[in-house]
Amino acid sequence: MKNKFYQYIQDLQDSITTKLETIDSKAKFKQDLWKRPEGGGGRTRVIENGAVFEKGGVNISGVHGKLPKSMQVYFNVGVVDFFACGLSLVLHPKNPMVPTVHANWRYFEMYDEDGSIIDSWFGGGQDLTPYYLFEDDAKHFHQTCKTACDKHNPEFYPIYKKRCDEYFYNTHRNEGRGVGGLFFDYCKTSDDMTMENWYNFVTEIGNSFLTAYTPIVEKRKDLPYTKANRDWQEIRRGRYVEFNLVHDKGTLFGLKTNGRIESILMSLPPHVQWVYDHHPKPGSEEAKLLEVLANPKTWA
Amino acid sequence: MKNKFYQYIQDLQDSITTKLETIDSKAKFKQDLWKRPEGGGGRTRVIENGAVFEKGGVNISGVHGKLPKSMQVYFNVGVVDFFACGLSLVLHPKNPMVPTVHANWRYFEMYDEDGSIIDSWFGGGQDLTPYYLFEDDAKHFHQTCKTACDKHNPEFYPIYKKRCDEYFYNTHRNEGRGVGGLFFDYCKTSDDMTMENWYNFVTEIGNSFLTAYTPIVEKRKDLPYTKANRDWQEIRRGRYVEFNLVHDKGTLFGLKTNGRIESILMSLPPHVQWVYDHHPKPGSEEAKLLEVLANPKTWA
């Protein structure tokens, strides 16, 4: 399974970066191969200063070895060997009318002393962070997620949509990071689902990413915007930074377990502002966004 | 003691904001009074878009009531009443040749059921974060810290200087946040020091702040700078954000114990950049700064 899924994310990275370069038309992804001293490594691809994408990364990694101490505590296990691989992407478009997107699909294995798998699971999701709310975009993104989920189990979409709203939430601001999407974790063998079933589900979601996101980019990338729109985008990006550095488990794990810093922090936006006690005008487009972030909606 | 120290920080806030307004000559501090629902409140003073200070806050607060659960765990105590007050300041100058500065002086009390003090201590410090390293500035700042410390105990400066280097450290980057200063905490009654002695020490440091920082501002605020200097400043400010959101105990406590978010996050810089895998040219002024941040120096 680990080889099959690692092959899958390699291919997916290729198809996603190829398509994004076509859309951008100006910038190309810069590739960095890196090795983890304790075992494994990754292929980081970063795009910067594009016509459409101001900054973004589409990264894969596959790491293995002894489970780091902090993860032993987290998973409540002893000294065990592990393997983990995944694709993580974040795209920060230049035009404030185009939403930021994040996605991640990952697979994890732990082994006993004989090298037999003692536990394994899939995790992942994809979620949208607009600066200006186009309801059609949120509906399209969520409908694509729902269609992909429904092929496997009609209960998946409502559950994983709710988990996404709950996870990507800035508790210290009482607001969601964005309009959500899907978030799932610890997808393990059960009465209903074999690991093969989970593989089919996770790759279905991975394959739906470009369909979920790129039509929105095409539709909004040439819309006009003002300096005020751009300031608002940079202020909202500050909330994105707050979530990733204060709450996001993946980021904090990476930072505290000696991960490759530049690959982890490629998720941080290029230009960001913090303004003291900023509040948009009541009734404005900016205020309309905040309303939805404080009260997650049903989109599909 | 609590009334005496709270009076002191009120007066110190006045003298600091008055002096900074004089230096800035354009912007004034905007004051926000706030109340904490569970007891106490604060006086936040923020300056923005000044001629010298792009953003900064000089805040006092005095809060009391039942110790929040997360702090009970942290201090390893049960349900007790507490009182805490302090002054916190962060100043982000516009000109990249002027360093950012942070300072904090605080006092804490915990009570038994009868309202008797079961524990009390002072804490605080002040530290400098330059974007370009002027050795004279680091020396002046540290010498002022040392002179203030030496009046109370010649052992204080080396100990608190080292703690500052250790505390304001981005472990995930293997570099210091800045060139340090002083950091002390849990300053309690001992054979050598009564609480009155500690009060005299902490207020001596508080009184030294303007002497330590403002001559540096006056000396550098009109130096010319380029867009490249400014970009570097904004990239380095990203590291400041990383420290405050990932590592700083005060910030995380505030965010997780329902503190006043805008007063806590006034510490975040106004304009910030994250550039993927950024490295200054070997031998440049920028590289010289990184060298010192990775290897803290003796300045006084």
Image: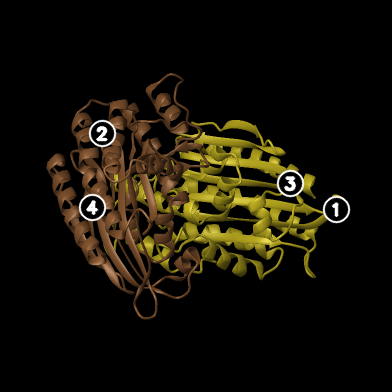
Chain colours: A brown, B yellow
> Marks 2 and 4, Cα distance to the nearest angstrom?
18 Å
Which quadrant of the figure has residue A84?
bottom left
Q: Is residue B93 visible?
A: no
What chain does badge 4 belong to? Answer: A
Query: Disc 4 marks which residue?
Result: A46
- Residue A180: give x, y in percent of width and height: 37, 39
Query: Disc 1 marks which residue?
Result: B116
Instruction: For the residues labelled 4 and 3, say whether their Cβ atoms are less than 8 Å apart.
Output: no
Query: Disc 2 marks which residue?
Result: A95
Pick the front one: B35 or A73: A73
Both marks 1 and 4 on one chain: no
Residue kind at label 1, given as amino acid type = Ser
> Marks 3 and 2, Cα distance to the nearest angstrom?
47 Å
- The reply, left or right, for residue B263 in relation to residue A180 is right
Q: Is residue B5 visible?
A: yes
- Residue A18: give x, y in percent of width and height: 13, 48
What chain does badge 1 belong to? Answer: B
Q: Callout 1 environment at 10 Å: few (<14), some (14 to 19), or many (20+)?
A: few
Residue furthest out toward the right: B114
Q: Residue at x 47, y 69 (%)?
A: A72
